Image (tube, rainbow, N blue to C red):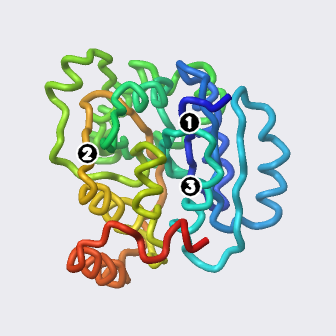
Amino acid sequence: MPTKATVIISFYNNIKALRLILSALNQQSITDFEVVIADDGSKAEITKELLAFLEKYNYPIKHVWHEDKGFRKNRILNKAILAAESEYIIFVDGDCIPHKNFVEDHLFFSQQNRIVAGRRVLMSERQSAKVNEKYIEKGKLFSFKFILALFFDSVIKKSRHVESALYIPITSINKRFGSFNRGVKGCNFSVHKQGLLEINGFDMQYELPCVGEDTDIEYRLKLLGYEVFLPKFRLVQYHLFHKPLSRVRIMENNIIFSETIKNKLIIAKQGISQL
């Protein structure tokens, strides 16, 4: 029987962070979902370790892998979409831990022709170091005490976007202060699988971070008539500290995206149908 949602986790070698994400998914308020790990070429010893512990969780997990040939996130995401058994797909990055109501929230705000999008708290190195599997299992990550710690940490300009940690499950407030005017972040969005198939999935021409895994796919779905909705105080996600990725070659992605805009391309030139 198909599950209500598939959570696709982008992954590359960071098994410590993956364990935290899977532990958080084990605490979800609903259990009717599956997970697909979209592995962009992790090392053999990493995949061996990963496969050894996947059965400990209370939801089904698939591991989709391809050889490491550089940054090919969009290609492995497309493979993960094909592996998904659900009609609704939620995307999470491999360094972002979801709140205990994360899956339920995405499903709650889902609609046909809608991308549901969220943001994430950027935890400092100090706050990130506090978080381990036991910390999550005991519910401490989702506690008011941890939110307070994040706010105090933000005063010294360490943790950022800590307002995104506030969780208020009141639909009228979520909708009243939500937005239809903000863009998609690849680490926290969801959409019906059919929409992804209609645009041929992620464009695999992008082989560098940024633009290809969010801005591009948002643009092409909007050409199909999709809206983007960001409910306020829901879809909470905690981003683990790491050094910023290089943006030196982002112009290469911008050139590809400019061509997509110029030609109003809905269908990815190199997408799911090319696999």
Quadrant location of the C terminus in the rendered image:
bottom right
Tags 3 and 1 in contact by the CB under 8 Å rule?
no
135 lies left or right of 151: right
What residue is shown with label 3?
10
Near mark 2 (Cα within 10 A), the count class, few <14, some 14-19 or many ≥20, is many
Residue drawn at 30 percent across, 41 percent down: 114
The tag earlier along the polypeptide, 2 or 3, is: 3
Q: Is residue 106 above or below residue 209?
A: above
What residue is shown with label 1?
131
The amino acid sitting under disc 3 is Ser
Q: Nearer the viewer, mark 1 or mark 2?
A: 2
Residue 228 numbered mark, or none: 2
State the separation of the CA atoms marked 2 and 3: 21 Å
Near mark 3 (Cα within 10 A), the count class, few <14, some 14-19 or many ≥20, is many
Secondary structure state at the residue bearing disc 1: loop
The amino acid sitting under disc 1 is Val
Residue 159 or residue 229, whichever sits in front: 229
Q: Is residue 56 above or below residue 126?
A: above
Q: Is residue 86 above or below residue 42?
A: above
Residue 63 or residue 197, whichever sits in front: 197
